[in-house]
Amino acid sequence: MAGFTEAKTTRKLIIMFAAITILLIGVSIGSLLYLNHTINRFSATLYEDINRNTGLIRNAERDLNQASIALQMILNPSLPEAQRSDFRREFDNNLMGTEQNVEDIRLKLDSMEPYQRGKKSEKLLADIRQELASFEGPFGEWRADAQALLLTGRPKSGEVPENFSSAPDSVQLKQALLNLNRSEELLGSYAEQVIADFQSRKSSVFALYSLILFMLVLLIIYLGRRILSLQTEMREEQALYQLIGETMSDFILLTDANGLILYASPSHFAGFGYIPQKGDPLSLYIREPEIAWAKLKSVVQATPKMAELRMRSSEGHWIWLETRVSPVKSSLPIPARFMLVSREITQRKQYEERLHKLAFYDHLTSIPNRAHFKMYMENLISHPDDRRQKLALALLDCDRFKQLNDTLGHLAGDEFLQLLSRELQQAVKGLGQAFRIGGDEFAVVLHLGSVPEKMDEILDRLLQLFNKSWSVNNGSSFRTSASIGVALYPQHGKTINELLRAADLAMYRSKSHGGNEANLYVKGMDEEYPEQEDTRH
């Protein structure tokens, strides 16, 4: 199924690149066609301007010839005066038309400047302007002679034949017409030269476009092959990672920034009987509140963190794990993913718990022992002054416990201590903590808080707890009582040894009064019982 999916992905990529290639080729061909159309339109516009200018030159030639004919008719002596006037108006109009057409040609030549694409076309345009400038000389001379003749009956310059009917063949007129013909020929040459320049540029642009298109196709082919190669490498790496994940014994979890599971290694099944589901929150599977996801993210933003947590197995029991939580680097300031790599440490935790129990709990009664008592007290009195609580340390000693051992045996004594320890723990629950610090000697740490007046009530409850009959050794009855000494913190001592000595002196007073009594330490006890040494270190 995975191979089929990857094949479909590969086909999609190939189709996508083929579509991009076809699209780019289509765009390139469209661009070339548009460029060709633009050049053709440019050529058509150029030819229109050339034809318009050529028409103006021909109109100028026609008006000049008509002016010459009208002049001949005016000079005909047999022409009636009315017709002479008409030919005079026609003569003036033709001269004005010739001048207007030549002026229009000059203006049109200025609008043809953008067509220049080379030195040859620029020179041809300059030659046309030169011919039009040369036209002004002979045309002006001929027009001046004709107007002088009309006014005086004689040409203004030079000698002319007596019969002026040959004026159209005059040198000035021929020269003017020759300038116009040359201008017309040069316009045709200019058009051919500009078109040739554009065709050359068109070929260059087409060749450049073809080269770019070819390079583009080669680039797309290269990218397509590169993608296929990278996809093959990714598939091989994925298979390798999957093989590692399936064969390694460690448990691997990958989560997103919100603690949702993205991946769980198959090794979970061997250890837990199931594999955590993708998309489930991690908090569904772990027990420890200190591993809460919001707190975990804030702790491991930059560096990995080691944590011990428990995950529930499919059978319902909890399995201890040592987990390394690492942020997966990303471009964002907050890690986008977290990697949890765990290994089972259930046996180690159970061993540590046994060691802790042996070190800090009494093996007979299972309540905290003397070592636990010292650690407990050190934690309480090591707080800063503003956080220290008012405490009472009560030492309890069983009266007539040696008699119990002597009469009923040590097993009965052990059974009594176990019963007493359970009831003592229950009696001070919520008020403090009970400890066994010696054979038949116990310590109770009371948290007085804001109600120290309750201490007397608690002490009475403890005396009543001891002062009753106990059934031990399969029904044997034994009655005992307790001698209790109490020291207050910090009034009677600021160290553990000071408090123990004060409580011990108060307990000694209770014993000296016959037991079944609780006494609070007072300063006079040091002088009253100087022989009582403090041995509780």
Image (tube, rainbow, N blue to C red):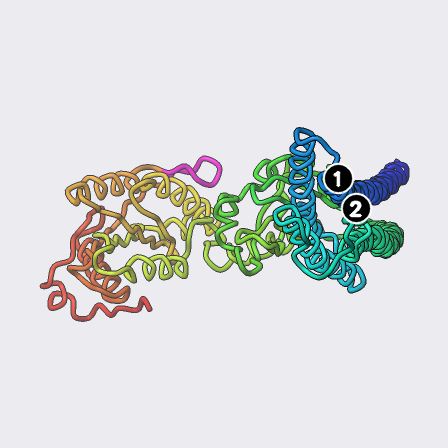
Secondary structure of the residue carrying tag 2 is: helix
Q: Name the residue under label 2.
A: 165
Left or right relative to 190: residue 362: left
Residue at mark 1 to residue at mark 2: CA–CA distance: 8 Å
Residue highlighted by disc 1:
76
Q: Describe the element under mark 1 as helix, strand or loop.
A: loop
Who's the residue at 19% across and 53% down the image?
510
Q: Earlier in the sequence, mark 1 or mark 2?
A: 1
What is the span of residues highlighted in magenta in the rendered image? Answer: 470-477
Amino acid type, label 2 = Ser
Residue 294 showing in the rendered view: yes
Q: Does the magenta stretch include residue 476?
A: yes
Residue 310 located left or right of residue 390: right
Residue 20 is at least partly visible in this image? no
Image quadrant in which the C terminus is located: bottom left
Residue 28 image position (x, y, % from top left): 83, 45
Principal secondary structure, stretch drawn in magenta: strand
- Answer left or right for 237 relative to 273: right
Q: Determine crowd level at label 1: few under 14, some 14-19, many 20+ residues with C-alpha closer than 10 A.
A: few
Residues packed near mark 2 inside 10 Å, few (<14), some (14 to 19) or many (20 plus): some
